[in-house]
Image (spheres, rainbow, N blue to C red):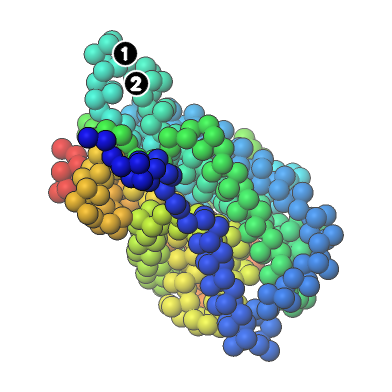
Amino acid sequence: MSAPPSATRLLLLPRRRRPPVLLPLLVLAVVAVVWIVLATALEGRHLLPQPWELAIQLRADLPLLLANLPPTLGVAARGFLAGVAAVIPLAVIAILAPPLEPVVQRIAIVVHVIPFVAIAPILIVALPGDSARVVIAALQVYFPLLIGLLLGLRSTDERALDVVTVAGGGEVSRLRFVRLASALPSLVSGLQIAVPAAILGALISEFFGADRGLGAILVNAQDSLLTERVWVVALSIGAVAAAGYGLITLLARLIVPWAGRGSSVAASVAGAEQAVLRPWQSAAGAVSSAVLLIGFWASLRPVFGFDAFFVKDPAEILRFLVEGNPLTGAPAAAFWEVFASSIGVTAVHASVGFVVGTTIAVAAAVLLVAVPGLERAVMPLAVVLRSIPLVALTPLVVLVFGRDLVGVTVLVTLVTFFPTLVTVIMGLRAAPEGALDVIRASGGSGLTAARRVRLLYAVPAITASARVAVPAAVAGATLAEWLATGDGLGQLLTLSSVQADYFTLWSGGVLLVLIVLALYAVIGTVDRIVSRVLGIRA
């Protein structure tokens, strides 16, 4: 029996959808209202201008911005490409030779966690031209992209891998026919994180003696107390980063339109497939990592030509830690006492900021995936917020939240929130559509599907984001201590750099790296335990 004509017409009519522009406009309106209220409350403090004041300043500074934008974008683009060019082959090597994966990750952690307040002045002095600025921008890209890509290369359907194996294919064939396609969503999300990171890295690199670029303008504006110009530059660089994020998203939809739409089959949990190393392989990887890192460190002066005044070799640092400062005669105990006090403060700042930032990011990711259209409205604002340098936000954060733990937590959260958000969103979307359809058919909402299905499949993505967020939280804590609190390891390293005490600077940096490596190992152990409890891995 055929349906009535009216019912047929109703079935053929396309579903009405709310215009996608309404939700972004609503979010933008809310942000504008909050901005105006906050600026009005802080009127007279010269911290947060009104939106119309920014519009007037933007019009006046437009020629200045356009003249200084190309140098910043040029450094960011070269740093972005250098980071991507370094990460992709390293990730492939780690997959093809599983015992090398821990080595690759440890080296990446060491490179990423060295506080830029310690390394940036040395790079600027040691490397010619814009090379140091490109390196700083590339370092901002390198680590989060590597961890995300490794997660993607491991996010494979085991049955597809078995098909290739049964057909006689080896690890190269498994990589070529299965892993590369599976890694595309993670590569896209990694590139989305990398774009604002590269731009922010280029901007930060210009804080140290650059005579052009948006970073140089920002520093000069701060020194001259030109608040409106500071915010115009900060928001302009955020808008550029948001445009780069949007470009990556658009290209991904055109080139890999299936990325991020969920699996159509009941694939295994994303990232659950891991290489199992024998004890001797793990031990060999740890020894190899130490040899490579110490060897590279020892080669900085004889091979790369770094000046001995700035760069201390491993033997000198070991003697300093055991015997004391050879220049001042201060005993080693004096350094250890100061370092223990400083690292205790930084540990509190970083751990609280990490927990708060991760919790907010996971909750926000669930909400953005569960509510249609909300991600499109909120993500540009998240990119802008990630791209605004902390030197511009710190005075406002300090005034509103204070210089104590609350203020530092806000600053660390700003550093850890965005990469965690993007990575967890990718993991939430790895849930198979079949499982989601079961929830929908039983009348469950998007939030119900996120809680009961998506979060399970996002567990490896959450642990991967923690591997990025922990070093980022430590770096953010040291940066906040430099800019706001005047205590902790950030202040110790900053004073060492200003006073040219490179023994203390290098010793503090090396010990910080060792601590973060230990924390990274703890995260890996927790990841394995949680995965076994949830039945994700054997």
The residue under label 2 is: 174
CB of mark 1 within 8 Å of CB of mark 2? yes
Q: Quadrant of residue 170?
A: top left
Q: Is residue 224 visible?
A: yes
Q: Residue at x 15, y 43 (%)?
A: 535
The residue under label 1 is: 169
Q: Is residue 286 visible?
A: no
Q: Give the structural element (helix, strand or loop) at label 2.
A: helix
Q: Residue at x 43, y 37 (%)?
A: 259
| Residue 283 percent coordinates (x, y) | 28, 36
Q: Residue at x 48, y 33 (%)?
A: 256
Q: Nearer the viewer, residue 28 or 477?
A: 28
Whichever of labels 1 and 2 marks the residue nearer the N terminus, that label is: 1
Look at label 1 and name its amino acid.
Gly
**Crowd tier of the residue under label 2, counting other residues whose Cα lies within 10 Å: few below 14, some 14–19, many 20 or above:** some
Q: Is residue 382 left or right of residue 130?
A: left
Look at label 2 and name its amino acid.
Arg
**Crowd tier of the residue under label 1, counting other residues whose Cα lies within 10 Å: few below 14, some 14–19, many 20 or above:** some
| Residue 124 percent coordinates (x, y) | 69, 51
Tell me, for residue 364, which label it has, or none.
none
| Residue 452 percent coordinates (x, y) | 22, 53
For residue 361, above or below residue 164? below
Q: Give the structural element (helix, strand or loop) at label 1.
A: loop
Q: CA distance from mark 1 to mark 2?
A: 7 Å
Q: Quadrant of residue 121?
A: bottom right
If the image is split into quadrants, where does the N terminus sit? top left
Q: Residue at x 46, y 80 (%)?
A: 404
Q: Is residue 531 left or right of residue 142?
A: left
Q: Is residue 433 left or right of residue 479?
A: left
Q: Is residue 56 left or right of residue 332?
A: right
| Residue 64 percent coordinates (x, y) | 83, 61
